[in-house]
Amino acid sequence: MIKLKSVRHTGVPVMDVKKAKNFYGKVLGFKEIPRPNIKGLPGIWYECNGTQVHIIGQRNEMAAKGFPGIGTHIAVQVEDLEEAKKVLKRRKIQFNEFTPPPHIGNAPVLFVRDPDGNVVELRTEP
């Protein structure tokens, strides 16, 4: 079994980032946190009691290509990413490994899909 540490963030796709900013920031009162500049991908990040909510604008090239982690997803901290890969391989569960560019955080992450096709991101960085 994969050793989990915590839920790190969830990704929420939106069509209008400005409207989402008003709702999540002003109506719900989420605290805005710094977000790296991700070329071609609009969005805003919030934090609520240690869990981040990543608002992801869907009017962009990466979303159109179906890139994992750009749409709805949940990101989970794991103790050991290499062990997680071994578990997934043993269970014959397909995954994609992705190493983000340094300005986003260059620790590799794994993307898997649950039985209904929902994306789960597994990561080890803080």
Image: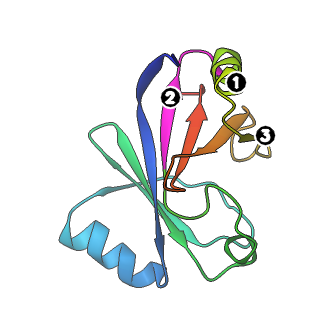
**Amino acid type for the residue under numbered disc 3:** Thr
**Amino acid type for the residue under numbered disc 1:** Lys
Please provide percent x and percent y for residue 84: 63, 21
Considering only order in the chain, which callout, 3 or 2, is on the residue closer to the N terminus? 2
Mark number, residue 99? 3
The residue positioned 56% from the left and 55% from the top of the image is 35
- Choose mark 1 or mark 2, whichever is in front: 1
Foreground: 94 or 125? 94
Please provide percent x and percent y for residue 61: 75, 77
**Which residue in the structure is indicated by mark 1?**
85
- Cα distance in 3D space between marks 1 and 3: 14 Å
- Cα distance in 3D space between marks 1 and 2: 14 Å
The magenta region covers 74-81
Foreground: 98 or 43? 98
Mark number, residue 77? 2
- Choose mark 1 or mark 3, whichever is in front: 1
Q: Is residue 68 one of those drawn in magenta?
A: no
**Amino acid type for the residue under numbered disc 2:** Gln
Classed neighbour count for the residue bearing mark 2: other residues with Cα under 10 Å, few (<14), some (14–19), many (≥20): many
Considering only order in the chain, which callout, 3 or 1, is on the residue closer to the N terminus? 1
Classed neighbour count for the residue bearing mark 3: other residues with Cα under 10 Å, few (<14), some (14–19), many (≥20): few
Marks 2 & 3, CB-CB < 8 Å contact: no
Q: Main secondary structure of the magenta part?
A: strand
The residue positioned 68% from the left and 36% from the top of the image is 109
Mark number, residue 103? none
- Cα distance in 3D space between marks 2 and 3: 15 Å
Q: Secondary structure at mark 3?
A: loop
